[in-house]
Amino acid sequence: MYNKNVWEAVPGDTWVHQLDVRTKLAALVCCAVLVVLLDSPRTLYLLFCTTLVLHGIARASWARWRVLLLFVMLGIWGSMISQALFYGQEPRTVVACLLSPAVPLIGTLTGGVYIYREGLEYGAVQALRSASMLSMGLLISWTSDPRQLLRSFLAWKMPYELAFMLITGLRFLPVIFQETAVVLTAQRLRGFEPLRSLAPRRLIQTAFQTLFPILARTLRRAVTLAFSVESRGFGRAVHRLGLGRWPQGQWFGCVLLLLVLLSLMVLKVIDALQFNGIRYFPELRRFYDLMKVWM
């Protein structure tokens, strides 16, 4: 995880690597719209599995699979637990009681702490949304040259300063993990064992002794980078290299994908109209049934 090569994009000869950067960004935009548009757990699960299949096609290393699995599992765990504890809609089915209302003071103030089944289900659906976007974003960052991403943003009329800072943040992420590895190695050589004790005082001490050096080293690198880009005329109107021609097949595929996305949005609006009792189209009865299952 702390290896810089795990986070940086590396060249490859796979089909995913050879896709135009603009095609990947269009797919990312479509994925972002779909995770908001879809409500069906099975469809969101299929979307997430599709992103995993793309990682397999890109021949992601085992280190990257471990990073992806770690982030996805943390996101799923956090979303499900938080929704299970604080789910406020009705009906609610209690699965377990963590704190009884009969407990003095805390139980009276909170009214009891419970785990709700509907909260677990709702949290799992929300976790699939974030996991799909996380997986797709990592796929693009691991298989795309940051310079090509910058040129794509500029070609799509994104402000130069915003595009540059976005790509700089993307390329700065591996540096943060590399600095973390250096600090942890230095601490271990001094005899410091971060996980020797799980006592609260020990954990706080571990955080201070680890995070502050990482923050200091990262800030020094950021200051050096700021002086470097400022000395090279950051934000000035200079000649920039453009992108090559967008492959016609990929361009047509993106247009087709956008048309499908627009069609799904129209169907979603029609389904919302009949669900709220505003307008019902009898001839679309079969579509209503399909949308209940898949959308």
Image (spheres, rainbow, N blue to C red):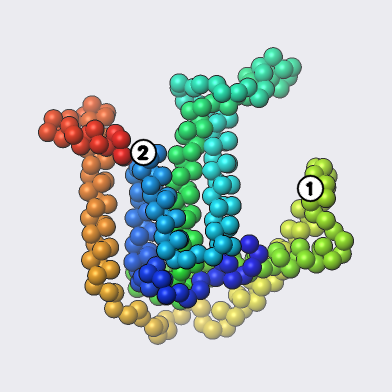
Residue at 62%, 70% (x, y): give it: 4
The answer to whether residue 150 shows anywhere in this view is no
Residue furthest toward the top?
Answer: 102
Tell me where residue 34 appears, x and y as whole percent.
35, 49
Q: Secondary structure at mark 2?
A: loop
Q: Earlier in the sequence, mark 2 or mark 1?
A: 2
Left or right: 49 as drawn, with respect to 248? right
Tell me where residue 282 appears, x and y as whole percent.
13, 30
Left or right: 286 as drawn, with respect to 20? left
Residue furthest toward the right?
Answer: 191
Structural crowding at the residue carrying mark 1, measured as other residues with C-alpha within 10 Å and reported as few (<14), some (14–19) or many (≥20): some
Q: Secondary structure at mark 1?
A: helix
Structural crowding at the residue carrying mark 2, measured as other residues with C-alpha within 10 Å and reported as few (<14), some (14–19) or many (≥20): some
Which amino acid type corresponds to the residue marked 1 in the rendered image? Leu
Residue at 34%, 55% (x, y): give it: 30
Say which mark, if any, is on residue 40. Answer: 2
Tell me where residue 23 appears, x and y as whole percent.
33, 66
Image quarter of the C terminus: top left
Please determine whether, in this image, residue 152 is positioned above or below residue 76.
below
Label 1 belongs to which residue? 203
